[in-house]
Image (tube, helix red, strand yellow):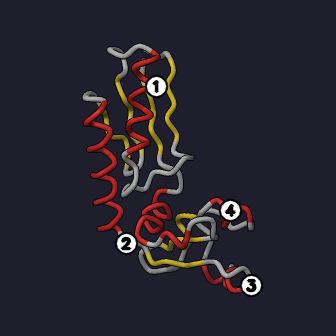
Amino acid sequence: MYGLVDCNNFYVSCERVFNPLLRGKPVVVLSNNDGCIIARSNEAKALGIPMGAPLHLYKTLIKQNKIFTYSSNYTLYGDMSSRVMSVLNYFIPNIEIYSIDEAFLNLKNFNIQSLQDEMFKIRERRAYLPMDRHTCFNWNRTH
């Protein structure tokens, strides 16, 4: 059995770790040159801002809806990713990091009850991690 962990809206979630006042508010993160929107909170998605949208096409919507806008901070996101992966690896020794915010977990040595217990422990340790109650812990029976 394998599991997939995927942190939702990862770059926005990282920004929210250091600014909790952003929780529940629309937030977007911009590309290297601040030209495109590369991450959106659920609140920003609900306002109709698409992934990869050119910033200049959405400036009016951003201003009207008081959407918080951040330049990307890849040093922060890399550090937060390392923290997430370390916590995962502490509880589940066999992981494969797939991307900055995703990892596959080899769960062959866990029964369902111990697996649920481990996922609960990971969620408890999320205080300074970009993991919220929407972080996806999913497992299924494949290869």
Judged from the image, the secondary structure of the residue bearing numbered disc 2 is loop
Q: Position of residue 100 (x, y in %)?
A: 37, 51
Give the number of the disc on residue 116: 1
Contact between labelled residues 1 and 2, with CB atoms less than 8 Å apart = no
Of marks 2 and 3, which one's residue comes earlier in the chain? 3
Of marks 3 and 4, which one's residue comes earlier in the chain? 4
In the rendered view, does 133 fall on the left or right side of 71?
Answer: right
Q: Amino acid at mark 4?
A: Lys
Observer-side mark, 1 or 3, equals 1
Of marks 1 and 4, which one's residue comes earlier in the chain? 4
The answer to whether 84 is drawn above or below residue 39 in the figure is: above
Label 1 neighbour load within 10 Å: few <14, some 14-19, many 20+: few
Q: Amino acid at mark 2?
A: Asn
Tell me the residue that label 2 is attached to: 73
Tell me the residue that label 4 is attached to: 45
Judged from the image, the secondary structure of the residue bearing numbered disc 1 is helix
Q: Amino acid at mark 3?
A: Gln
Residue at x 36% of width, y 46% of height: 125
Tell me the residue that label 3 is attached to: 64
Of marks 1 and 3, which one's residue comes earlier in the chain? 3
Real-space CA distance between mark 4 and mark 2, rounded to the nearest whole angstrom: 21 Å
Q: Amino acid at mark 1?
A: Gln
Judged from the image, the secondary structure of the residue bearing numbered disc 4 is helix
The answer to whether 115 is drawn above or below residue 64 in the figure is: above
Q: Between residues 29 and 138, which one lies in front from this camera angle?
A: 138
Residue at x 37% of width, y 72% of height: 73
Real-space CA distance between mark 1 and mark 4, rounded to the nearest whole angstrom: 30 Å
Real-space CA distance between mark 1 and mark 3, rounded to the nearest whole angstrom: 43 Å
Q: Position of residue 24 (x, y in %)?
A: 63, 65
